[in-house]
């Protein structure tokens, strides 16, 4: 009887041991599965944080690239992101570590929102400033062009005034004359009878010319290309003028009729042929005509 009870006790104990064994095995298996699942979830979560950090770094890269001048705040924040990424790569994959990185990410996210907002405002201001500078440069260029144009016009006007402020002559005529002892002058076309060449012209009125003593150079050239009269020279810069006589007069801004006489060379008579008469104001030829002695 006592032996039977012992056997029964052993069977019961063995059954309990078997149940406990299988229970422990089942529980251990479940713990293992849960551990692997948790680890996978933490790994996935870590990758999500890594992706968010990389996306944030890309935003900073784009913001930095949009500025011609490097923004020190953006560059510093970008370096913080890169440091966090490098740290996350080698960190342990556990809840505590992941939670810490998530908090840092959220803090950096807020900082980025502020910095990018400031950067956008600064970019708008720079764009406005650049547009304003372009507009100012255009106005300056227009002003410079206007000033240059005005200078050219003034220079041209000064040249016109300078060129216009000279004496001119009209009605220039040259012809031979016979001079009587009484002083009477008789025009002639015969070279053998002419005693002198008479040159007459009118000095035209010009309000731009200063009144007072003035002079013009008269040049008479015979058919042999000789300059008659005094045949003296005067130099104007690089130009030399041979003239027959200097016509001096008092100019009062009115038309003035003038006649001058030019003699032949020595005792010689005048040559037959074409004669040229020129009147110069300084180096400038102001009128010219010709006549013929037969």
Image: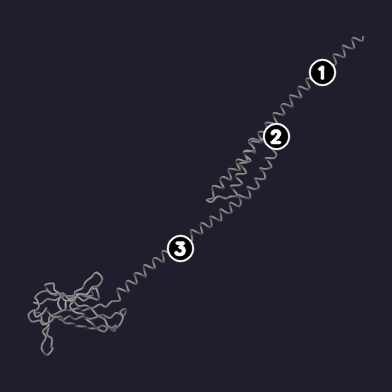
Up-down relation of residue 116 to residue 149 (above or below): above
Q: CA distance from mark 1 to mark 2?
A: 36 Å
The image shows residue 76 at horizontal and vertical percentages of 60, 47
Q: How is the image coloured?
A: one colour
Viewer-side label of 2, 3: 2
Dot 2 and dot 3 residues touching (CB under 8 Å): no
Q: Dot 1, how many residues are within 10 Å of its Cα: few (below 14), some (14-19), or many (20+)? A: few
Which callout, 1 or 3, points at the residue further toward the start of the chain?
Answer: 1
Q: Which residue is mark 3?
A: 140
The image shows residue 176 at horizontal and vertical percentages of 12, 80
The image shows residue 60 at horizontal and vertical percentages of 58, 45
Which residue occupies the extreme left position in the image? 192
Q: Which residue is mark 2?
A: 94
Dot 1 and dot 2 residues touching (CB under 8 Å): no
Foreground residue, 61 or 290?
Answer: 61
Q: CA distance from mark 2 to mark 3?
A: 66 Å
Quadrant housing the C terminus: bottom left
């Amino acid at each position: 009887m006592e032996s039977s009870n012992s056997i029964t006790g052993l069977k019961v104990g063995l059954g309990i041991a078997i149940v406990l064994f299988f229970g422990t095995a089942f529980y251990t298996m479940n713990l293992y599965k849960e551990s692997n699942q948790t680890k996978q979830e933490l790994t996935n979560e870590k990758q999500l944080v890594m992706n968010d950090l990389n996306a944030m770094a890309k935003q900073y890269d784009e913001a930095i690239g949009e500025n011609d001048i490097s923004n020190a705040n953006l560059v510093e924040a970008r370096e913080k992101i890169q440091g966090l990424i490098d740290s996350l790569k080698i960190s342990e994959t556990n809840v505590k570590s992941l939670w810490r990185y998530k908090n840092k990410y959220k803090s950096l996210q807020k900082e980025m929102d502020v910095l990018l907002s400031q950067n956008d405002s600064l970019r708008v201001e720079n764009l406005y400033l650049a547009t304003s500078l372009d507009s100012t440069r255009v106005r300056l260029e227009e002003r410079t062009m206007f000033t240059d144009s005005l200078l050219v016009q003034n220079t041209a006007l000064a040249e016109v005034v300078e060129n216009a402020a000279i004496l001119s002559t009209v009605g220039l005529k040259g012809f031979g004359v016979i001079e009587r002892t009484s002083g009477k002058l008789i025009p002639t076309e015969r070279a053998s009878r002419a005693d002198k060449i008479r040159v007459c012209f009118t000095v035209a009125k010009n309000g731009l010319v200063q009144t007072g003593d003035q002079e013009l150079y008269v040049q008479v050239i015979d058919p042999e290309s000789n300059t008659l009269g005094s045949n003296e020279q005067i130099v104007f810069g690089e130009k030399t003028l041979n003239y027959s006589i200097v016509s001096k007069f008092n100019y009062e801004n009115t038309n003035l009729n003038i006649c001058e006489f030019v003699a032949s060379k020595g005792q010689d008579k005048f040559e037959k042929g074409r004669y040229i008469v020129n009147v110069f104001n300084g180096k400038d030829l102001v009128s010219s005509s010709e006549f013929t002695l037969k």
